[in-house]
Image (cartoon, rainbow, N blue to C red):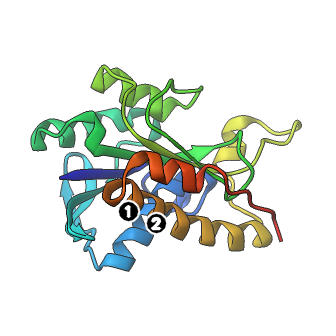
Amino acid sequence: MYIIAGLGNPTREYDRTRHNVGFSVVDALADKYGIDMQEKRHRALCGKGVIEGQKVLLLKPQTFMNLSGESIWAAVDFYKISAEELIVIYDDISLPPGQLRIRLKGSAGGHNGIKNIIAHLKSQEFPRIKVGVGEKPPHMDLKDYVLSRFSQGEQKLMDEAFKEAADAAVMMMTTGMERAMNHYNTKKRKEE
């Protein structure tokens, strides 16, 4: 069984913000595979299903970003899965909008949600998909930037990226992490 966790902040005010791209990717997976995301467990909205023959739990923590580890740890512990069977999807300001980067492990890189997950799992060794949201403009506070919404041009690009990140998660589960990294880490995106 895999747990695919998309990071974000609950409540409508954060819907479709840069910080909530993880939620958008999980929604894309749920839509594509007909998985109902209404169940409330593990301090998250979640849905169980089967994707390309793999049992999955899709997870959208409702703890707010900086406490994502509480929800993810609760699910990982409940299902007794290994860290390699967890895929975390989140925003990355060091990547251009829509660009994906798959990593099998690593530090938090300044992302507080990942920092909290690492603290709860007591490990950095879990696969992740970073979704580029673009670099913060110099005049803007980081918090304000990640809680902002995409421009119309960016949103079109991001909608494609959400589908692509969903496909990347499926490839990670079905054909292997290395193959997914080779396929998705080389692609570049340009804003239209």
On screen, residue 57 versus residue 107, left or right, reads left
Q: Quadrant of residue 161?
A: bottom right
| Depicted 108 relative to depicted 142: above or below | above
**Disc number placed over residue 116 in the picture, else none:** none
Reading the image, the residue beneath label 1 is 170
Q: Which residue is found at the position 70% from the left and 74% from the top?
A: 156
Local packing at callout 2 (Cα closer than 10 Å; few below 14, some 14-19, many 20+) is some
Horizontally, residue 71 falls left or right of residue 24, namely: left
Q: Where is residue 74 shown, x and y percent of the image?
A: 19, 38
| Image position, residue 97 (x, y; %) | 72, 56
Image location of residue 9, percent across then percent down: 46, 49
Residue 53 to residue 44: above or below: below
Q: Please, what is the three-letter code of the amino acid marked with disc 1?
A: Val
Distance from Cα at disc 1 to Cα at disc 2: 5 Å
Can you identify the residue that label 2 sits on? 167
Q: Residue at x 46, y 32 (%)?
A: 114
Badge 1 vs badge 2, beta-carbon distance below 8 Å: yes
Q: What amino acid type should be assigned to the residue bearing mark 2?
A: Asp
